Amino acid sequence: MIAEMRKMFEVVGRFPRSTLNVLLGAMALVFTINHINTVWFGNNFLEHYLPLSVQGLKAGDVWQLVSYMFMHEGIGHIFCNAIVLFFIGKLIEERYGGRRLLELFFISGIAGALVWFAVNFNRPFSVLLGASAGCLGVFSYFCFACENRPMVFLLFPLIPVRVKPRILLAITAGMEVFCFFTQELVKGNVANSAHLGGILGGLGCYYFYRYCYQYVSMIKEKLMKRRRIVDAMADDSYKLYIKSYSAQRSEIDRILDKINESGFKSLTKAEKNTLNSAKHLMHR
């Protein structure tokens, strides 16, 4: 009985290592460190270097294209992104693996950052932060890759509604477009352009993996095979066989003539190796 209880607690207490947990943990860690530095020590060091700013990107701070995704404005901001990433990212990781989830998150996040930068290029003091673009990219990929899997959410506290993923994505994208023209272009306080860029990044990943990834894998396999052949040809033991038959025969005849004139002891080590490697030609 004690052994069974110990085994049960070991299983419950085990924290599964996965890409999703790493992403969520990184978001929570950066948020906690930034909050402690700001509230307890009055130091906003991270807020100067991690968020994406127009001035920073123009100055060459390209790391901000990635680092901004781990900075959040408040507890509500990070909570909403974490909820979306947890439920949708879990399904993506279970079906396609952690590497696919990681690629979707960062590609969509970078796509959202680039679209936002293009829209706010003439606003030098604009700043972008949050993982919304990456999360929406993962969400848009899910809506196309798992289109036949209906989603259930509460329209009101007690009214569950079942909606197909692509319809929900169309509603989300439509709301973002509306808010982009009525809020971001007017006030600039919500980064709807980054959200739209993240959605487009996720859709781009979907079409790439569905139609182009197999061809890229084939090309990569051919290049690796060619590389192995080149490495094999670079080996000294293989160099004799890449010559033409006439060239090999001519070299062997020269060595045999040298043996007739000066004896076998006059051969160099390389000439002896050549004879030893070409015994099949000497018997022809």
Image: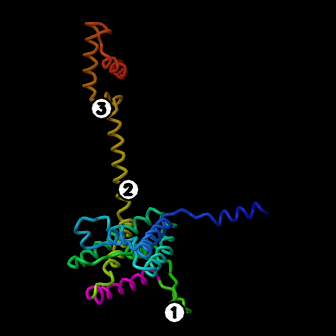
Disc marking residue 156: 1
* Of residues 267 and 278, the one drawn nearer to the viewer in this rendering: 267
- Residue at mark 3 to residue at mark 2: CA–CA distance: 29 Å
Q: Do the residues labelled 3 and 1 touch (CB within 8 Å)?
A: no
Range of the magenta residues?
Answer: 164-186
Let me know if residue 108 appears in the view. no
Sequence order check: which comes first, mark 2 or mark 1?
A: 1
Q: Quadrant of residue 38?
A: bottom left
Residue 15 in percent (x, y) is at 58, 64
Which residue is at a point 54% across and 91% down the rendered structure image? 157
- Residue at mark 2 to residue at mark 1: CA–CA distance: 46 Å
Q: Is the magenta stretch mostly helix, strand or loop?
A: helix
Q: What residue type is labelled 1?
A: Phe
Check disc 2 and report the residue beneath it. Answer: 217
Check disc 3 and report the residue beneath it. Answer: 242
Q: What residue type is labelled 2?
A: Ser
Q: In which quarter of the image is residue 185?
A: bottom left
Sequence order check: which comes first, mark 3 or mark 2?
A: 2
Residue 208 in percent (x, y) is at 35, 66
